Image (cartoon, rainbow, N blue to C red):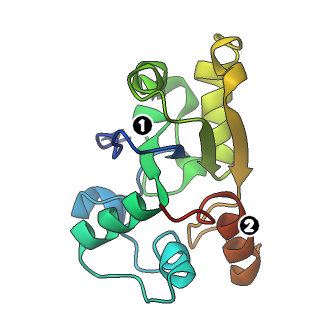
């Protein structure tokens, strides 16, 4: 098994919603960019909300996040995983990121949105269960994974749910 390490968070003082994935997929790790797989819907959804196509330039993608007050990070800092699938993460190897520290530093964040069930399950196991009172002030929303591996939910349904919960407010 190969040890995978997540990226630094993408947040600023205006971030009010933090999207948490589980661990970047292999395409993202190779490119050192969040949601780099070309079939991942993540960047396409806010672009559609703006009436645009998703920019190819990563810096432009990150700027788009700022328009909506959205930040990115992953629940897991490290894990062992073969390939990209969440189902291949070795649970006993999981080490969580310091999400409590991040939220303490960025008090404008009031909403945590999980990109898929695995992200929420890891969050619950490593952070929510040991610290339930800390997370009482946050809205927690589990969203369908934008990964191409999550083909059971129609694309338009994913767009609709994500637009409603994450991409509805432009700053």
The residue where tag 2 is placed is 161
Residue 160, relative to residue 170: is it above or below?
Answer: below
Q: Residue at x 57, y 30 (%)?
A: 91
Rendering coords of residue 111 (x, y %) = 62, 40
Callout 2 environment at 10 Å: few (<14), some (14 to 19), or many (20+)?
few
Frontmost residue, 134 versus 110: 110
| Residue 40 can be seen in this image | no
Q: Residue at x 77, y 76 (%)?
A: 157
Rendering coords of residue 20 (x, y %) = 53, 44
Q: Residue at x 44, y 45 (%)?
A: 15
Q: Who comes first in sequence, dot 2 or dot 1?
A: 1
Q: Secondary structure at mark 2?
A: helix
Q: Nearer the viewer, mark 2 or mark 1?
A: 2
Q: Secondary structure at mark 1?
A: strand
Q: CA distance from mark 2 to mark 1?
A: 30 Å
Frontmost residue, 56 versus 3: 56
Q: For residue 161, what is the image quadrant?
A: bottom right
Rendering coords of residue 29 (x, y %) = 29, 56
Callout 1 environment at 10 Å: few (<14), some (14 to 19), or many (20+)?
some
Residue 104, relative to residue 169: is it above or below?
Answer: above
The residue where tag 1 is placed is 80
């Amino acid at each position: 098994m190969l040890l995978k390490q997540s990226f630094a968070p993408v947040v600023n003082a205006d971030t009010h919603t933090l999207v948490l994935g589980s661990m970047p997929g292999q395409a993202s790790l190779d490119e050192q960019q969040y949601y780099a797989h070309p079939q991942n819907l993540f960047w396409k959804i806010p672009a559609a909300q703006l009436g645009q196509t998703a920019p190819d330039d990563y810096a432009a993608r990150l700027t788009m996040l700022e328009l909506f007050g959205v930040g990115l990070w992953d629940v897991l800092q490290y894990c062992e995983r073969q390939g990209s699938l969440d189902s291949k993460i070795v649970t006993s190897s999981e080490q969580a990121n310091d999400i409590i520290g991040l939220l303490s530093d960025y008090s404008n964040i009031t909403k945590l949105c999980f990109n898929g069930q695995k992200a929420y399950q890891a969050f619950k196991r490593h952070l929510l269960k040991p610290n339930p009172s800390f997370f009482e002030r946050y809205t927690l929303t589990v969203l369908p994974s934008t990964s191409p591996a999550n083909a059971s939910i129609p694309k338009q349904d994913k767009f609709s749910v994500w637009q409603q919960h994450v991409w509805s407010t432009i700053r």
